[in-house]
Image (cartoon, rainbow, N blue to C red):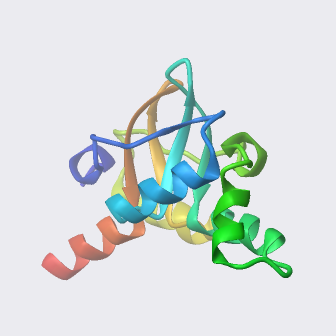
């Protein structure tokens, strides 16, 4: 099976200058753990729940929940995103995607055609496929 057969093709994204509070709200609302970051329609990074957790933790020293929320409004996505994004192509095999995620210890792979984001495949997608097979 090819990545393009399993990937989500409707992908929510962030911009480099979006705030972390916006990213957190989007993740909570849509129940996502990863959001690709685009600039001029090109993939330039990815933000995970782990990135949000680290940013919140760094501000948590003595702050309450409200203060942490206010802090996240001041931090931009570009300050915490991973900019060396591991990707996969739509025509690659699902097995290759799974092996890449395991090797890199990551939970998703943005699917790119050239430099253009065309989808996202996550470990949950692969587990769902295994469970349904």
Judge left or right: residue 79 versus residue 88: right
Does residue 59 appear anywhere in the picture? Answer: yes
| Residue 41 horizontal/vertical position (percent) | 49, 22
Please, is residue 16 above or below residue 3 in the view?
A: above
Using the image as rendered, state which of residue 22 and residue 30 is in the foreground. Answer: 22
Say which residue appears at 28% left-offset and 49% top-offset: 8
Quarter of the C terminus within the rendering: bottom left
Q: Is residue 6 left or right of residue 27?
A: left
Which quadrant does the N terminus fall into?
A: bottom left
Q: Residue at x 64, y 34 (%)?
A: 16
Name the residue nearer the viewer: 122 or 59. 59
The quarter holding residue 28 reads bottom left
- Picture residue at 40% right of the left edge, 62% below the top: 32
Q: How many marks?
A: 0
In depth, the one of 77 and 133 nearer the eye is 77
Which picture quadrant has residue 72? Answer: bottom right
Nearer to me, 10 or 17: 17
Image position, residue 129 (x, y; %): 22, 70
Give me the residue at 33% from left, 59% from top.
Answer: 30
The answer to whether 111 appears left or right of 22 in the picture is left
Q: What is the x, y in percent for residue 121?
A: 38, 55
- In the rendering, at what x and y percent does residue 6 appear? 25, 54
- Outermost residue, top side: 40
Left or right, residue 45 beside residue 108 = right
Regarding residue 133, the answer to whether it shows in the image is no
Q: Is residue 100 above or below residue 53?
A: above
């Amino acid at each position: 099976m090819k990545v393009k057969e399993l990937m989500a093709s409707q992908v929510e994204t962030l911009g480099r200058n979006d705030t972390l509070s916006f990213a957190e709200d989007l993740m909570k609302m849509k129940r996502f753990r990863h959001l690709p970051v685009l600039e001029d329609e090109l993939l330039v990074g990815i933000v995970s729940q782990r990135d949000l957790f680290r940013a919140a933790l760094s501000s948590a020293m003595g702050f309450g929940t409200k203060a942490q929320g206010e802090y996240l409004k001041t931090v931009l996505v570009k300050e915490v995103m991973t900019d060396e994004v591991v990707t996969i192509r739509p025509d690659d095999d699902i097995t290759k995607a799974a092996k890449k995620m395991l090797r890199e210890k990551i939970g998703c792979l943005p699917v790119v055609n050239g430099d253009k984001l065309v989808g996202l495949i996550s470990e949950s997608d692969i587990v769902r496929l295994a469970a349904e097979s």
